[in-house]
Amino acid sequence: MDRFYVTTPIYYVNAKPHLGHAYTTIVADSMRRFQRLLGKDTYFLTGTDEHGDKIVQAAEKAGVSPKDFVDGVSGQFRDLWPHLGVEYDQFIRTTDPEHKKVVQAFLQRVYDNGDIYFGEYGGHYCYGCERFYTEKELENGLCPQHQVKPEYIAEKNYFFRMSKYQGWLKQHILDNPDFIRPERYRNEVLSMLDSGALEDLCISRPKSRLTWGIELPFDTDYVCYVWFDALLNYVSALGWPDGDRFANYWPGVQHLVAKDILKPHAVFWPTMLKAAGLEPYNNLNVHGYWLVRDTKMSKSLGNVVSPLEMIDRYGLNAFRYFLLREMHFGSDASFSEEALVGRLNADLANDLGNLYSRVLSMTAKYFGGVVPAPDTYTEEDETLRALAAEAQRNFCNLFGRVRFSNALESLWELVRALNKYVDSAAPWTLFKQGDTKRLGTVMYTLLESMRKVAVHLLPIMPEAATSMLAQLGLEVNVDAVDLGNEAETWGGLQPGTTVAGASNLFPRVELVREKDEPAEVASAKGKPADGAGTAKNAKPAAVAPAPAASPAADAGVIDFEDFQKVDIRMGTVVAVERHPNADKLLRVEVDLGEEKPRQIVAGLAAYFSPEQLQGRQVAVVANLAPRKLRGLESQGMILAVRQGEGMELVSVSGPVSPGSKVS
């Protein structure tokens, strides 16, 4: 059986966990679940890094011993992971006795091999990074990470002959293009190696300065440098050198790290392994930062995001989906609640949730909640099945290459195509016509495709995907799933299976605001975006009561006869593209049940891509006088609701025929 070993960095316990820790751990959990669905023997390691200067300083500030301090913060990390749906195999701590033994054994081996020596060194020491910097590594004399002036320290210490392995490391990276990914970080490391000779690494701290660490086995007056200690968790967890897990899983490991710890993992770690006679890891996968208001999260800036708060407000499924969908792995990404709510409502509620709601309710209505047997597949059905197969192949290929956002976008091409297929196949019309055979084929095609979508979401949203499969009458047995073969098979959902009569997996949500944060007040006089009616969907701020006014005195009140003049109809978007002369506008063709689709120019380009609108049902003011917008005639207005900084389309609770009048 193929094996897959994935690790998070072990998190430094000088502060409580935040969004960045949650992201890395959820990614590792999703990778592990994905590989298990491919039939691999998997192992998932996470844990905490608990030695070093910063721990002592944080403990002193808290008025407790280092041991009591690390026990408390490590417990916060361990307690958080179940709330994030994370299922790890092992949680390691660098204060574990077995880890200490491995660190000392590893140090002794490298020492015996002649790659550790005693010497005197003077350098610029940053207590925040717990490392020495050379002159050329500083930025205007400051630490590049913390932007503070390091302290110059001269002392005797032990050094690892890292420079000895510079040529080997560079050649290994060149010979293995995926060793560090994405490519930008591979290039960064190569540039680092090319910029000058790799210096030897100071791997000890004298006990006269620091006692909170692992003693060197060959000199008890020194403790091990925290990075040399921490990196070894990846093999100490497996019982190096003689443990069964080490023999089983090493070196087939996928390390996950943020870009701020690239150098220790891309330079220190592989050279350490080489010096001890171990094979290097398979891949180092490096992600960017989560930014809040375009700034890296910082406790001092007060912009640290609490994962538990987001889950309490919007649910675990939306949180996990958002993190993997929003960040293009390797690049920085911006976090905001507005963006999270936008993703939840657009992707999960409008696209996926609406699909499940429509199809299951129609199955209940037309077939008594039982999966029908398909008859002959038409060209339209085969086209959809081919698209589904391609979406599944792309998903698996991209997800396996840590391109999670792209993988989900590929899967959503199928979700949107299924919604469009509902509208084009029009099951309600087939039911009225009594065409049972064709109706059965359409409904089976939808239900089986929905099963495939749910299976592919098991790694990302295991809780929601399990519920989706349960609504299709299926129980989840991950050991029986063959995700790699899903694209090549059809018919996993057996006709005769009883399905749920309704679905409300992803209800739409509003942005949750803090009590002291003023909400926007709805305005009946606000100017709508070109081609798109808008309304604020927020609670009014608390104001002093005003004297009551009669309806006649309110300029916003209209008579019923005026309302009757407005003709609002539901239509289906059949084509959409960006306006050739305006970045904020889209040219949308909407089927309103007329001889040909209406052309509407809508100011929605900042909120929806053409792919997101394709196949959607929209509310249209159908009797609005035509007018030209940047050279294109607009024959109506698409209604939308402004929410926070985003926009949501006005929609209906279930499928309706194109041209249905809103009354």
Image: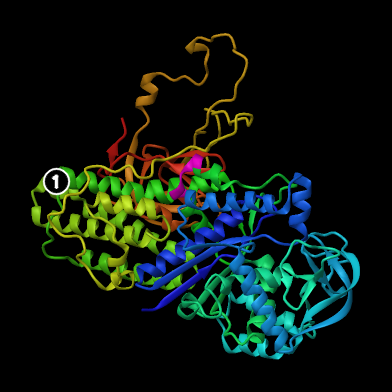
- Identify which residue, 549 or 337, lies in the foreground: 337
Image position, residue 641 (x, y; %): 47, 38
Image position, residue 52 (x, y; %): 74, 62
According to the picture, the residue beneath numbered tag 1 turns out to be: 366
Residue at the (35%, 47%) spot, across then down: 353
Label 1 CA crowd tier, 10 Å (few <14, some 14–19, many 20+): some
Task: Look at the numbered disc 1 and give the secondary structure of its residue.
Answer: helix
- Identify which residue, 117 or 180, lies in the foreground: 117
- Residue 590 seen by the camera: no
Q: Is residue 185 found inside the magenta-colored segment of the image?
A: no
Residue at the (58%, 89%) spot, across then down: 175
Q: Is residue 314 found inside the magenta-colored segment of the image?
A: yes
Rendered view: 110 above or below 422: below
Image position, residue 104 (x, y; %): 67, 75
- Identify which residue, 141 or 226, lies in the foreground: 226
> From the viewer's perspective, is 26 left or right of 446?
right
- Identify which residue, 316 or 209, lies in the foreground: 209
Image quadrant assignment for residue 408: bottom left
Rendered view: 540 above or below 391: above
- Residue 211 seen by the camera: yes
> From the viewer's perspective, is 388 left or right of 314?
left
> From the viewer's perspective, is 623 left or right of 444?
right
Of helix, strand and loop, which mostly describes the magenta segment?
A: helix
Which range of residues does the magenta coloring cover?
Answer: 312-318
Amino acid type of the residue that numbered disc 1 sits on in the rendered structure: Tyr
Where is the C terminus found, in terms of image quarters?
Answer: top left
Image quadrant assignment for residue 270: bottom right
Rendered view: 449 above or below 533: below
Where is the N terminus found, in terms of image quarters?
Answer: bottom left
Image position, residue 292 (x, y; %): 65, 50
Rendered view: 524 above or below 55: above
